[in-house]
Image: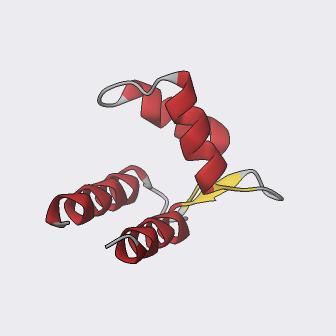
Amino acid sequence: RSRSFKYIFHFFLTFETLDKEGKAVFSVEEIKRLFTQFGEPFAQDEMDELLNAAVTPNTREVHYRTFVHHLILDKEQNL
């Protein structure tokens, strides 16, 4: 359990660090660029899964604080 929450927290801190303007929002293009430039590259199916879960359909943006909040809720429900 602890490792999962540490991973989610690390994910959140990464978004916070990369969000230089403090918007708490990334475009789909920015997310793709960030996830292919930093760390271990995501496979296409992994990227698709992430974007399907994270993208707000009407704006095509990722509100990462909301996304991380949903990840935490999902982990808590699966305990």
Residue drawn at point x = 39 percent, y = 24 percent: 41
* Towards the viewer: 20 or 16: 16
- How is colour applied across the structure in the image? secondary structure
Left/right of residue 65 with respect to residue 39 in the rendered view: right
* Towards the viewer: 73 or 34: 73
Displayed quadrant of residue 28: top right
49 in relation to 59, above or below: above
Give coordinates of residue 59: x percent, y percent: 79, 57
Left/right of residue 39 with respect to residue 21 in the rendered view: left
Give coordinates of residue 51: x percent, y percent: 61, 44
22 in relation to 14, above or below: below
Give coordinates of residue 32: x percent, y percent: 55, 33
Give coordinates of residue 66: x percent, y percent: 54, 71
* Towards the viewer: 39 or 1: 1
Q: Quadrant of the image for the N terminus? A: bottom left
Residue drawn at point x = 34 percent, y = 31 percent: 38
35 in relation to 10, above or below: above
18 in relation to 1, above or below: above
View extreme (right): residue:
58
Left/right of residue 54 with respect to residue 41 in the rendered view: right
